[in-house]
Image (cartoon, helix red, strand yellow):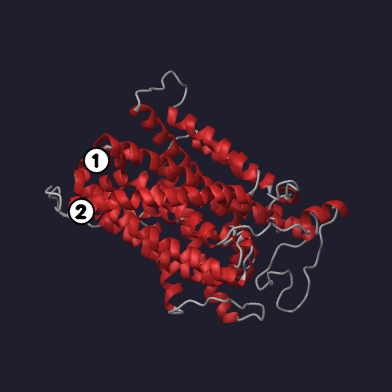
């Protein structure tokens, strides 16, 4: 099977009507039936799609980033999250149109490879896989921090370990979530739905109380502080840091091949999750900085929201937010591991990774090998425990993907191939995809140089892998 070229129709034919030039050799008839013709089952509905988007995004933005963001940008961190939400929306709209025309697993990789060509698709696809690996590791480290905080709240301290307890706990949860995903997408989606519903109920009640307190209706005064206390430039650099919080909507696209009624549910899930989560982020930072002030909030680090809840509601509030933080970081990691495996699955189906990586477990209907190829690197990165670096590298790789998805929409609209028939078309074309591409690329300039260097190195290695492995495979017609 040849890797896809620009203009290839999602079903396998290109715009000229020709089939791909080579089928994989060395594959038995039995494996062809079991691996080539078996598609992932569509078991995720609208609620499940929203749960993946919201559940992935709401964990980092509310329970890991407030302290880190406040220390960088002060109260203006609220604006940083708002900027991230606007950029995410500018990308979610073009992605929704592409997804309804090509509702297949792989998300941005699939869209770009079919519209811009294999080389772009390879770099983006491999980058997306590794970007989700970095994001998953970031979420698991945050989950570990929250478990440690819960244990500390009940008087349990973990000492004498060769690594930090949050790292060890992140590793254990990474193994458990990968194993859960192997047993079936429906199991993972059902768990995600329950977690997100409970989480939103807790957060809505807590933030409502916090807003009433911050506005003085309960007789307290907010901490007086200049909005741009750290200056204006940190607002953009902080937006680049916290953009990891907005990766969830694109993860809906990576499981598009498992979404029911994709032409309706994909755009609703992607756009809806961005709007809902942005509102929660902005209100959260407002409540948090009003409670303590940005400088003190920054001193609390990854579990700053626990101290905000303790300040507002005492120990019951701290326990409540600890529980919510566990649910949120758990759901973020859960959805990210699922999405990372689907990126591997899509790359393997197109022979950009070894063909055996797309094997499907016939008992559970899940790509078990792809899950292993996602879970393994995630555990390696969790062991580093570097929260901010993991977050920014994930943001970098996704911002490159987002910019190219906007360009892909411009390219496919201009070419207008006969197979391109989306059920959802974006308003404001071409301004929206142009702004989405420019904003995504522009935000990269405000990242730390180390994060950019790691991201560029990953993209360069991805291209070299494509030139050395995938091009050679295509020329041989082998897998």
Question: Tag 2, which secondary structure?
Answer: helix
- Residue 53 in the image: state x and y as whole percent: 48, 57
- Return the residue nearer the eye: 26 or 156: 156
Q: Nearer the viewer, residue 216 or 302?
A: 216
Please name the residue shown 42% across and 43% down the image: 389
Q: Report the quarter where the N terminus lies.
A: bottom right
In the displayed structure, does residue 294 sit left or right of residue 476? left
Give the residue at the far right of this rendering.
29
Q: Dot 2, crowdedness within 10 Å: few (<14), some or many (≥20)? A: some
Q: State the separation of the CA atoms marked 1 and 2.
A: 13 Å
On screen, residue 324 versus residue 195, left or right, reads: left
- Mark 1, Cα crowd under 10 Å, few <14 / some 14-19 / many 20+, is some
Mark 1, secondary structure of its residue: helix
Residue 318 vs 334, above or below: the answer is: above
Residue located beneath label 2 in the image: 212
Q: Nearer the viewer, residue 343 or 195?
A: 195
Looking at the image, residue 282 lies above or below residue 166: below
Task: Identify the residue position indicated by label 1 in the image.
Answer: 313
Badge 1 or badge 2: first in the primary sequence: 2
Give the x, y percent position of residue 434.
44, 73
Residue 271 seen: yes
Residue sitting at x 13%, y 47%: 220
Q: Quadrant of residue 302?
A: top left
Which quadrant would residue 11 be assigned to in this image? bottom right
Q: Position of residue 40 (x, y in %)?
A: 69, 56
**Can you say whether 66 is above or below 310 in the image?**
below
Q: x, y (%) of residue 407?
A: 51, 71
């Amino acid at each position: 099977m040849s890797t896809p070229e620009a203009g290839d129709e999602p079903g396998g034919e290109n715009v000229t009507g020709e089939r791909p030039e080579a089928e994989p050799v060395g594959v038995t008839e039995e494996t062809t039936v079991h691996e080539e013709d078996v598609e992932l089952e569509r078991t995720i509905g609208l609620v499940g799609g929203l749960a993946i988007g919201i559940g992935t995004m709401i964990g980092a933005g509310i329970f890991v980033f407030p302290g880190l963001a406040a220390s960088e940008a002060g109260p203006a961190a609220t604006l940083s999250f708002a900027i991230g939400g606007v950029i995410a929306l500018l990308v979610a709209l073009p992605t929704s149109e592409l997804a309804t025309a090509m509702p297949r697993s792989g998300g941005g990789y699939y869209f770009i490879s079919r519209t811009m060509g294999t080389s772009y698709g390879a770099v983006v696809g491999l980058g997306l896989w590794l970007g989700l690996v970095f994001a998953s590791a970031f979420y698991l480290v945050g989950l570990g921090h929250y478990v440690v905080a819960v244990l500390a709240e009940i008087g349990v301290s973990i000492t004498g370990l060769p690594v930090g307890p949050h790292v060890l706990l992140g590793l254990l949860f990474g193994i458990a979530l990968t194993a859960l995903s192997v047993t079936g997408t429906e199991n993972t989606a059902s768990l995600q739905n329950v977690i997100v519903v409970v989480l939103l109920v807790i957060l809505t009640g807590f933030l409502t109380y916090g807003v009433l307190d911050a506005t003085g209706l309960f007789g307290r005064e907010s901490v007086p502080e200049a909005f741009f206390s750290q200056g204006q430039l940190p607002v953009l650099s902080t937006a680049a840091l916290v953009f990891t919080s907005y990766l969830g909507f694109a993860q809906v696209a990576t499981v598009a091949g498992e979404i029911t009624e994709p032409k309706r549910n994909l755009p609703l899930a992607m756009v809806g999750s961005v709007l809902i989560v942005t509102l929660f982020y902005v209100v959260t930072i407002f409540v948090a900085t009003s409670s303590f002030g940005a400088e003190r909030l920054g001193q609390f680090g990854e579990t700053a929201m626990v101290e905000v809840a303790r300040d507002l509601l005492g120990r019951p509030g701290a326990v409540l937010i600890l529980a919510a933080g566990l649910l949120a970081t758990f759901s973020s990691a859960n959805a990210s591991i699922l999405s990372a495996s689907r990126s591997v699955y899509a790359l393997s189906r197109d022979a950009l990774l070894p063909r055996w990586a797309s094997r499907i477990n016939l008992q559970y209907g899940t790509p078990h090998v792809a899950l292993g190829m996602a879970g393994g690197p995630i555990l390696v990165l969790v062991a580093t425990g570097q929260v901010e670096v993991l977050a920014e590298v994930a943001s970098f790789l996704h911002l490159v993907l987002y910019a190219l998805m906007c360009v892909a929409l411009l390219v496919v609209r201009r070419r207008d191939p006969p197979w391109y028939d989306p059920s959802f078309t974006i308003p404001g074309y071409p301004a929206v995809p142009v702004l989405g591409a420019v904003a995504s690329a522009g935000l990269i300039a405000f990242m730390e140089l180390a994060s950019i260097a790691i991201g560029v190195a990953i993209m360069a290695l991805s291209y070299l892998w494509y030139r050395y492995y995938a091009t050679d495979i295509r020329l041989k017609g082998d897998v």
